[in-house]
Amino acid sequence: MARMKFICDAERCIECNGCVTACKNEHEVPWGVNRRRVVTLNDGVPGEKSISVACMHCSDAPCMAVCPVNCFYKTAEGVVLHDKDVCIGCGYCSYACPFGAPQFPSQGTFGVRGKMDKCTFCAGGPEEHGSQAEFDKYGRNRLAEGKLPACAEMCSTKALLAGDGDVVSEIFRSRVVQRGKGAEVWGWGTAYGTAAKQGA
Amino acid sequence: MQRTLISVSLVTAALALSACSEKPQDKTGIRSDQPAQAGTGVAAFTAPGWTAGDQASWSNHLKARANYGMNDHQRAPK
């Protein structure tokens, strides 16, 4: 069984924001909501690094743990999704998320938070696959179309890797071996945990 | 007569008190989602090379797609 994961190779990311644009375009994400964004570490300092950040679909997702209405669920491939018909827009998930993934569109006269919106790993949501209702609420379901997330497939430098954890980690490992540096995977340990150390 | 009166009053009381009972608050929760390998049924947008409904076929197709699309070291001439 595949376990879907994201890896962003900071050695390759050139901060072009192509992933952000691909996501916005693919899912017609509303104004003010960014399911994915590029963060630059040590901006302006020589050796700065950029990484593309979105929902990492954590193994032990904190958003799922804190949701008071239990609107989250995890697919067999490990993709964390939510039901917008159940979400009450309380915002607890955004406080719990270490990646700042949950987004809230401004809806209503007094700026009341709307239903939470986040990266779906291009896996849609709990509506009929490929339906207009699914597209309107969650965006396109590329996984059900046999495709990988648009952000990763559109990445010009292939810095952003998305897919089965075994495959993407092997691609990243082979890169690190070839270039001999840049083994740091930002957010990997936070999202997917670290392997237990022997004797610990 | 008295027995009838008692039965009627009991039924009336039961009906009246039923309004005081708690409404069910069971959360509906999320609706079940179809597995991704079920496909969308829209051939125009579906990538060729896998069989909808076959988990292994779908999984292998995505692995191959990831390797082809993202593993440039594998594709670059040696």
Image (spheres, coloured by chain):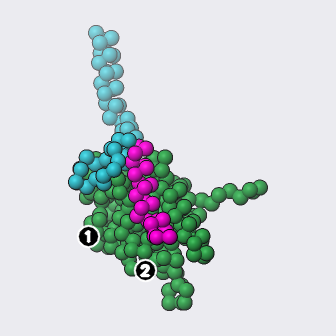
Chain colours: A green, B cyan
Give the distance between the C-alpha atoms of the residues marked 2 and 1, in whole angstroms. 35 Å
Q: Residue furthest right?
A: A199
Instruction: Indicate the chain on which mark 1 is placed.
Output: A
Task: For label 2, count other residues whose C-alpha is less than 10 Å away and answer few (under 14), some (14-19) or many (20+).
Answer: some
Q: Is residue B72 shown in magenta?
A: yes
Magenta highlight on residue A94: no
Specify whether residue B34 is in view.
Answer: no
Query: What residue is at 57 percent from the left and 65 percent from the top?
Result: A173
Residue A94: x, y in percent?
45, 65
In the foreground, A187 or A16: A16
Residue range (magenta): B55-78
Task: Characterize the local packing of mark 1: few (<14), some (14-19) or many (20 or more) Cα atoms within 10 angstroms.
Answer: few
Write down the residue under mark 1. A109
Q: Nearer the viewer, residue A63 or A171?
A: A171
Residue sticking out furthest to the front: B78
Residue position marked by numbered label 2 in the rendering: A15
In front: mark 2 or mark 1?
2
Both labels 2 and 1 in a single chain: yes
The quarter in which the C terminus of chain A is drawn is bottom right
Is residue B77 visible to us here?
yes
Please name whichever residue, B4 or A16, is drawn nearer the observer in this view of the structure: A16
Q: What residue is shown at x 32% (from left), y 16% (from top)?
A: B7
Left or right: A43 in relation to A125: right
Instruction: Give residue B18's position: percent from left, percent from top.
Output: 34, 31
In terms of secondary structure, where does tag 2 sit?
loop
Residue drawn at the location 50% of the way across and 70% of the way down = B78
Report whether A179 appears left or right of A149. right
